Image (spheres, rainbow, N blue to C red):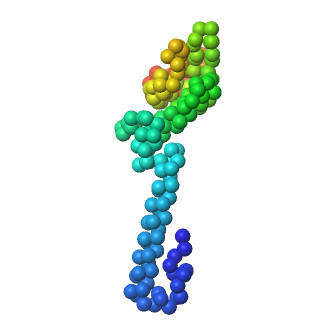
């Protein structure tokens, strides 16, 4: 933003009263621009903060004020992605938005079943409960489904010593490498 000083002759700044008014106008302009930028951020669900309840309302989501912004944004984006006909691509897109990683959907059409595999995520994705709720809302009732979750296997720990792993819980060891 340009300052008022850039638009008026320099001699105006010789008068302390005029200089004070021009500086106040500069500060007001900066606050106005910050407010406009903040409002523009609310128009994109990926950057919304105080505008998230509006997004959640638009997609029929009950706001969870205890959840962090990222979790709430993921829920809205998942609902946006799950609109329309349920397809493998839609399920992959939905699951990927919650796991922040690649997802494969394995179909068993003769069994009316699918498996959702988290490809490059080790351990249970942090917001699996939210993903489960979204899948229940969008998948046909007759379709059985489950998750395939990858954990660290004992054979993968051959290179580690007990001392290297001693400061971690078993859950931390099996969900990260």
Q: Is residue 105 above or below residue 40?
A: above
Q: Is residue 155 above or below residue 71?
A: above
Residue 103, visible in the rendered structure: no
Which quadrant would residue 107 be assigned to in this image? top right
Left or right: residue 34 versus residue 65 is: right
In the image as oriented, which residue stretches furthest toward the top? 110
Q: Which residue is drawn at 45% across and 60% down?
A: 35
Quadrant of the image containing the N terminus: bottom right
Q: Which residue is drawn at 47% across and 22% down?
A: 136
Residue 31 pos. (x, y %): 44, 66
Q: How many marks?
A: 0
Residue 148 pos. (x, y %): 56, 18
Residue 21 pos. (x, y %): 41, 81
Q: Which of 51 and 157 lies nearest the eye of the viewer?
A: 51
Left or right: residue 68 versus residue 89 is: left
Q: Is residue 165 above or below residue 45?
A: above
Residue 82 pos. (x, y %): 54, 30
In the image as oriented, which residue stretches furthest toward the left? 66
Quadrant of the image containing the C terminus: top right
Q: Which residue is drawn at 46% across and 74% down?
A: 26
Left or right: residue 120 versus residue 146 is: right
Which quadrant would residue 54 be assigned to in this image? top left
Residue 110, visible in the rendered structure: yes
Q: Residue at x 59, y 8 (%)?
A: 111
């Amino acid at each position: 933003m340009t300052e008022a000083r850039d638009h008026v002759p320099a001699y105006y700044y010789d008068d302390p009263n005029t200089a004070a008014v021009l500086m106040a106008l500069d500060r007001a302009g900066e606050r106005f621009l910050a407010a406009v930028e903040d409002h523009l951020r609310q128009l994109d669900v990926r950057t919304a903060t105080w505008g998230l309840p509006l997004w959640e309302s638009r997609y029929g989501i009950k706001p969870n004020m205890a959840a962090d912004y990222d979790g709430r944004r993921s829920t809205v984006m998942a609902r946006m992605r799950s609109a329309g006909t349920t397809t493998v691509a839609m399920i992959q897109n939905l699951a990927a938005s919650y796991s922040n990683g690649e997802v494969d959907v394995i179909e068993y059409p003769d069994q009316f079943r699918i498996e959702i595999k988290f490809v490059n995520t080790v351990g249970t994705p942090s917001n699996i409960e939210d993903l489960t709720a979204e899948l229940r809302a969008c998948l046909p009732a007759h379709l059985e489904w489950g998750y395939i979750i990858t954990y660290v296997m004992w054979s993968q720990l051959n290179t580690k010593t007990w001392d290297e792993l001693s400061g971690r819980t078993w859950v931390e060891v099996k969900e990260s490498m």
